[in-house]
Amino acid sequence: MSKAATHDDVSLILRLYELRREDKMREARQWFASMYRPVNSIEEFNRSCPPGSSMNAHFRMVTSYWEMVASFINSGVLNEELFFQSGGELLLTWEKISELTPALRAIRKNSRLYYNMEMVARRQAAYMNSNSPESYDTFASMVRNMGR
């Protein structure tokens, strides 16, 4: 069992929420959630998010934000269970990039690219299913089929 959540955990979650409300971040998150379609190859990614484009910048902003948050959880700075109770956007982000991640890792020669997000997402999926069987599979299927 993880350590009990503290006031510091709550403060950090609230601060992370405030950062998500910043105008550029809100724009990037809106685009990512509604317009970005999961792909599994670098070629598809470069067509949908060409280098230098606003779409590419939005992709990088959203994924780096959630990778940062996941690093807080993995390092024990942020209470995992408290985060899981309201942090569904991290899982949505991971589901949208999970098929592309191996190709990105290979081309960037970085086997740990999005590693923190992947580890947190795996535990969050298990957490969801432990509380409501099949909820993760239903969520993941919905995300993967967005716009297809």
Image (cartoon, helix red, strand yellow):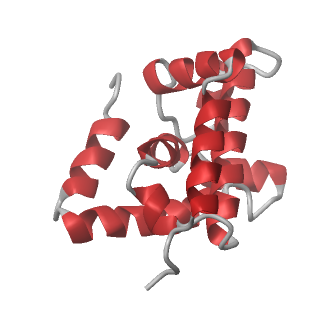
Q: Would you place residue 82 above or below residue 40 in this image?
A: below
In which quadrant is the C terminus drawn? top left
Residue farthest bottom in this picture: 1
36 vs 93, nearest the viewer: 93
Residue at 60% from the left image edge and 57% from the top image edge: 117
Work out whether 100 lies above or below 126. above
Q: Nearer the viewer, residue 17 or 145?
A: 17
Number of callouts: 0
Q: Position of residue 104 (x, y in %)?
A: 70, 47
Q: Is residue 24 left or right of residue 9?
A: right
Q: With 28 as the anchor, is 92 left or right in this view?
A: left
Query: Residue, x 42% and y 46% (percent of image)?
Result: 88
Q: Residue at x 66, y 37 (%)?
A: 42
Query: On the image, which quarter does residue 62 sit in?
Result: top right
Residue 115 in view (yes/no): no
**Quadrant in which the N terminus appears:** bottom left
Asked whether residue 86 is in view, the answer is yes
Which residue of the protein is positioned furthest toward the front in this rendering? 7
Percent x, y of residue 112 = 74, 64
Q: Position of residue 33 (x, y in %)?
A: 47, 26
- In this rendering, the answer to whether 63 lies above or below 127 is above
Query: In which image quadrant can residue 46 be found?
Result: top right
Q: Position of residue 39 (x, y in %)?
A: 51, 35
On the image, which quarter does residue 47 sit in? Answer: top right
Looking at this view, is 56 or 42 the one in front? 56
